[in-house]
Amino acid sequence: MSADDPRRIDGVGALSVLRRGLAASPELSAGAWQTALMALSVAGSKLLVPLLIQLVMDLSITDGGVRMGRTVVLCLVALALVLASIQLGRVTYFRLVRTAEDVLLGLRTRAFAHLHRLSLAEHTASRKGVLTARVTSDVETLTQFAQWGAVAWIIDSVQIVAVVAIMAVYSWQLTLVVLVLHVPLVPILKWMQSRQLLAYEELRTRVSDTLAIVSESVHGVEAVRAYGYREPMRRRIRNAIDAQYDQQMVAARYFSLVMPTADVFGVMAVAAVVGTGVWWGDAWGISSGELVAFVFLCNLLIAPITEIGEVLDQTQTALAGWWKVLDVLDTEVDLVDPVVPVALAAGPMDVRAEGVEFGYREGGRVLHGIDVVLPAGASVAVVGETGSGKTTFARLLARLADPTAGRVLVGGVDLREADPDDRRRAIRMVPQDGFLFDTSIAENVRYGRAGATSEDVDAAVAELGLTAWVEGLVDGIHTRVGERGEGLSVGERQLVALARAQLADPGLLVLDEATSAVDPETETTLERAMERLAAGRTTVSVAHRLSTAERADLVLVFDDGWIVESGPHDELVALGGVYSGLYASWLGGTRDPA
């Protein structure tokens, strides 16, 4: 299930999402009892204020006048309690903020790590902007909930129960009046909660769509400008933002009803208490001080009910975002590391594909029953028309995905059973775009092997004959390449990627050659670097250049997901089959076939 087409939340209860979210965020429960007790102490100090008011009125105000000494003492006690509550509230707040940041850090890193464990098929089925939203904006929705909302539910619920209990001690008759007036609020809030949760879940989808379109427009800025596509792209972004805005307003409409509704019921309760207390207070044995204290208790009851309405909005937003992130975490990892890993030997390794099939999440199978043996140390070129499955086959050799049927063995070991560290050391793939990170050339090359020194980097560059090219750059090997390596040309990015692979020193090298046109000098440098990199290794090249296929020991010809021909270049040309046709199209009348 792709991350941009998640399961709908309308079939799942809010409590189920909350339980699943708490299980996926252990930081939220760590020390939760201590935090809750601290917060409850803050809430408890508020309950003492009406009690002190009642004591002042009933004990300090008598028919003989006001007892100032007792009044001052009680007021000082109240002041001390308020100051202690303020200090405890401050400590509790910082504890909640720290918990919130721990939750965000843990959830974001777990979601990010999980995304990198998913196979190529999963990433192909999901838009990159949507995946980015899962570990950024969707996680961010938990901020307020983790800082206050989660504990507020505990505090407010306990405060409501405590206030009602104290009310019952004062007057069960007035308490009954308050409860009867608040009973209709329960189904109303439940109805609003269910509608609001659906609205926020849809809002998170709209946010993901907006980020995906913005990401696409930024990465495709050259094509947008070159083809005059700015206005259509602006309309797409504007439409996405408008859809997000409209959905935000839908969610806000529900929230706008919560607090006024709670306030209406609260005001009705206070009015009813005052009226019935004045009318029947003497008959029920309620003193004036108790009646005033009861009114204060009503306000203390209204406050958490109103706050629950506000926290409910935070909770709905958090649950919607949590659901999106949990959907990613629940996506099954199909690249499972072996329980008992098998070591891979160093040096050149043979490759064997046995009945290999593969299908992406959408579009059906792209490889059908591939059976082939590649000798250790051989140079193999994989050719075929676009969409024939050659790049997919190359990715399976690097275990960017597992076959949906059959198996791939390298050095006699099924890649699904190979030790992950050994596999990453022994097999390296240089992708078509030569992706680089926004740092220096030296740091990009150093990614090839953990712990590599500057001398190792220089040696890798020198072994590929790239020293002169590097020294000709503005800052030499310390030249920054820019985001995605855009400070370099396509061919230059590929050179850095080759140096990175050289530093790794793999036994099996998988090359997906760059197809973009490069200048003749860079192309010559690139071909020589590839030749040096392939020396002494098993090399599988997805060939886009005629020269690569000509120099290969073995050529595999893919057509519609099948290997239809295989053999040395000369034999395949003489055969007059699919490869011969590809070869003729490569020549394009620019070279004498003889």
Image (tube, rainbow, N blue to C red):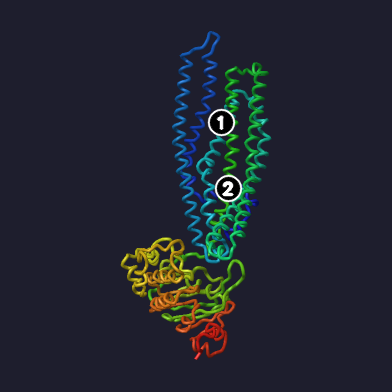
Viewer-nearest residue: 115 or 459: 459
- Which quadrant of the rendered structure holds the N terminus? bottom right
Please, is residue 317 above or below residue 593 in the view? above
Q: Which of the 4 image quadrants contains residue 454?
A: bottom left
Q: What element carries label 1?
A: helix
Q: Which residue is drawn at 36% across and 75% down?
A: 465
Instruction: Please give the residue where the numbered disc 1 appears in the rendered image.
Output: 162
Residue 435 in the image, given as x and y percentages of width and height: 46, 66
Q: Distance between the residues labelled 2 and 1?
A: 28 Å
Residue 145 in the image, given as x and y percentages of width and height: 53, 43
Type of amino acid under label 2: Leu
Q: Is mark 2 on a helix, strand or loop?
A: helix
Disc ID at residue 319: 2
Residue 584 in the image, given as x and y percentages of width and height: 55, 85
Local crowd size for mark 1, using a 10 Å CA cut-off: few (<14), some (14–19), many (≥20) = some
Type of amino acid under label 1: Ala
